Amino acid sequence: MKKTFLITFFLVFITIIQLSAQEMVGEWKTIDDETGKAKSIIKVYKARNGKYYGQVVKLLDNSKGENPLCTKCTDERKNKPILNMLILNDMELSSNQLSGGKILDPAKGKEYTCKIWLEGGTLKVRGYWGVFYRTQTWYKIS
């Protein structure tokens, strides 16, 4: 009886984690935590390697032109178009959240350690730099 309970509990736990991951996959509208304005649409997806990634599929803020470049980036993305750029990299699912990867802020050209979780139907995206962090709320696109 005890063994059956443990197996059932484990299967339910795994199912909940997988459902949460599926809910994180899709297109999300990003909101700038400093200005409160919509910035872009990010497509979050699971790759064949089992990790999660996010790509800019639409820019909503055209104040810097129709297809601005990541002029402040310091890696291979320097001076590349932000549209279609990967900004979430190597995220892994663990305990109902995505973590272990990096997120790029193209406006600042900086990459941060990242953690993502679902909260009330929204996606909370937190970038860390040492002990400092910023959290954005992203909204699911139907």
Image: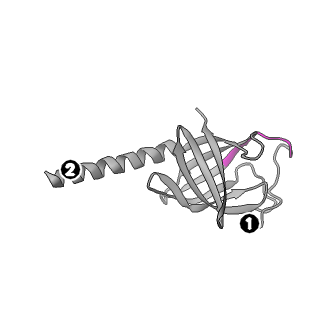
Q: Residue at x 64, y 61 (%)?
A: 128
- For this orientation, the residue located farthest to the top is 142
- The picture places residue 66, in percent across and down from the top left corner, at 83, 43
Name the kind of residue labelled 2 in the image: Phe
Q: Quadrant of residue 87?
A: bottom right
In this view, the residue in front, 8 or 36, is 36
- For this orientation, the residue located farthest to the left is 1
Left or right for 107, reference 95: right
In this view, the residue in front, 59 or 1, is 1
- The picture places residue 31, in percent across and down from the top left corner, at 70, 42
Give the Cα separation between the discs numbered 1 and 2. Answer: 51 Å
Quadrant placement of the C terminus: top right
Q: Which mark is residue 64?
A: none
Left or right for 93, reference 106: left
Q: Quadrant of residue 79?
A: bottom right
Q: Is residue 48 magenta?
A: no
Element class at badge 2: helix
Q: Residue at x 52, y 55 (%)?
A: 98
- The picture places residue 115, in percent across and down from the top left corner, at 57, 56
In this view, the residue in front, 83 or 108, is 108
Q: Which residue is mark 2?
A: 5
Reply above or below: 48 against 122. Answer: below
Element class at badge 1: loop
At label 1, counting other C-alpha atoms closer than 10 Å, the crowd grade (few under 14, some 14-19, many 20 or more) is few
Q: Is residue 60 magenta?
A: yes
Q: Which residue is mark 1?
A: 76
Magenta span covers which residues? 56-64
At label 2, counting other C-alpha atoms closer than 10 Å, the crowd grade (few under 14, some 14-19, many 20 or more) is few
Name the kind of residue labelled 1 in the image: Glu
| Count of numbered labels shown in the rendering | 2
